Amino acid sequence: MTAQPDLSELDYLDDAEVYRRLEAAKRAAAQDLLRDPATLARGLDPGYRTRPHLKVISQALVGLERGEYDRLLVITPAQVGKSTTTAEWFPFWRLCLHGEDRVAVTSYSDDLALRRGKTIRQYIGEYGSE
């Protein structure tokens, strides 16, 4: 059984302070989600399963974003979540951190690149800040 938080202290706060605390909690939660692409994906998409290999890929993508290396090759078997993580969640995560950047989505297939770009735009529309 989960313990319920004690909300009685909120009774003594004015509306502005309650709102300030709510906004601070939202910012803290957002920062936690932005730890890496897999954490962001799991936090926003309950269907995304964070498996051990996706955590490794996600941490490698963080290293790429930080400039620890200038290229990354990810090789896995098909249908294990690699493309969703690297070609959808990683660009979205990168844009969350660096909203002024531009991202090009490419693929061996025009249709696939267009679908992935559309997915990223949907993430921005649904989860992006106003």
Image (tube, rainbow, N blue to C red):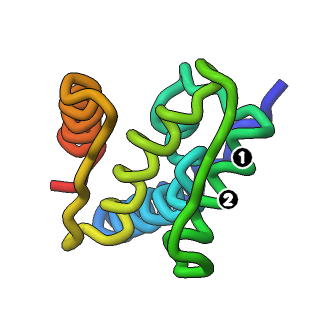
Side of 52 relative to 82 (left or right): right
Side of 89 relative to 3 (left or right): left
Q: Secondary structure at mark 1?
A: helix
- Front one among 23 and 101: 101
- On the image, the x and y values in percent for residue 46 come to 54, 24
Asked if residue 89 can be seen in this view, the reply is yes
- Quarter of the image containing the N terminus? top right
Residue occupied by mark 1:
55
Asked if residue 13 can be seen in this view, the reply is no
Q: Is residue 65 above or below residue 54?
A: below
Among the 4 quarters of the image, the one containing residue 77: top right
Side of 78 relative to 129 (left or right): right
Q: Do the CB atoms of the residues marked 1 and 2 lie less than 8 Å apart?
A: yes
- On the image, the x and y values in percent for residue 30 come to 46, 57
Q: How many neighbours does mark 2 have within 10 angstroms: few (below 14), some (14-19), or many (20 or more)?
A: some
Residue occupied by mark 2:
59
For image coordinates 66% across by 49% down, the residue present is 57
- On the image, the x and y values in percent for residue 52 come to 80, 38
- Front one among 5 and 104: 104
Side of 14 relative to 11 (left or right): left
- Quarter of the image containing the C terminus? bottom left
- On the image, the x and y values in percent for residue 25 come to 49, 60
Q: How many neighbours does mark 1 have within 10 angstroms: few (below 14), some (14-19), or many (20 or more)?
A: some
Among the 4 quarters of the image, the one containing residue 101: bottom left
| Residue type, mark 1 in image | Lys
| Residue type, mark 2 in image | Gln
